[in-house]
Amino acid sequence: MSTIRSLRVPFKAPLQPGDTAEATVGCRANNPDICKNNGIPEICAFEREDGICQIPSKAWKKQFERLSREGGGL
């Protein structure tokens, strides 16, 4: 399992393989401690074996599209 530090990914960081408009690899919350989904099994990146956040912030879809257009990874 990944360490907590490696699961924290800056919101504006380039896309990673596995990022989608609906889920992120790691946690891209600016403050994961106050995320309403923090610690929820099978939803939170910190609780899942694969480290994928199943419910990122509402702003993530727009950021994903922006990063995709800018060639921000993948």
Image: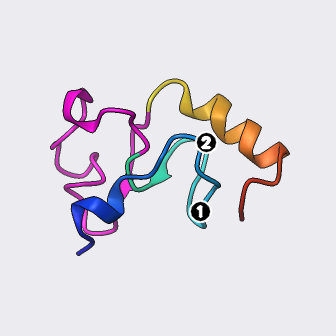
Occupied quadrant, residue 35: top left
Q: Which residue is mark 2?
A: 21
- Residue 54 lies left or right of residue 35; in this view the side is right
**Is residue 26 shown above or below 28?**
below
Q: Which residue is mark 1?
A: 16
Please tell me whether mark 1 sits on a helix, a strand or a loop.
Answer: loop
Q: Which residue is more in the foreground, 31 or 35? A: 31
Magenta-drawn stretch, dominant element (helix, strand or loop)? loop
The percent coordinates of residue 28 (x first, y second) are 43, 43
Please give the name of the residue rendered at 73% of the width and 44% of the height, measured from the top-left corner.
67
- Residue 65 lies left or right of residue 41; in this view the side is right
Lower sequence index among marks 2 and 1: 1
Frontmost of labels 2 and 1 is 1
Q: Quadrant of the image for the N terminus?
A: bottom left
- Which coloring applies here? rainbow
The percent coordinates of residue 45 (x first, y second) are 30, 53
Which residue type carries mark 2? Ala
Q: Quadrant of the image for the C terminus?
A: bottom right
Which residue type carries mark 1? Gln
The percent coordinates of residue 6 (x first, y second) are 34, 65
Q: Which residues are magenta?
A: 28-56
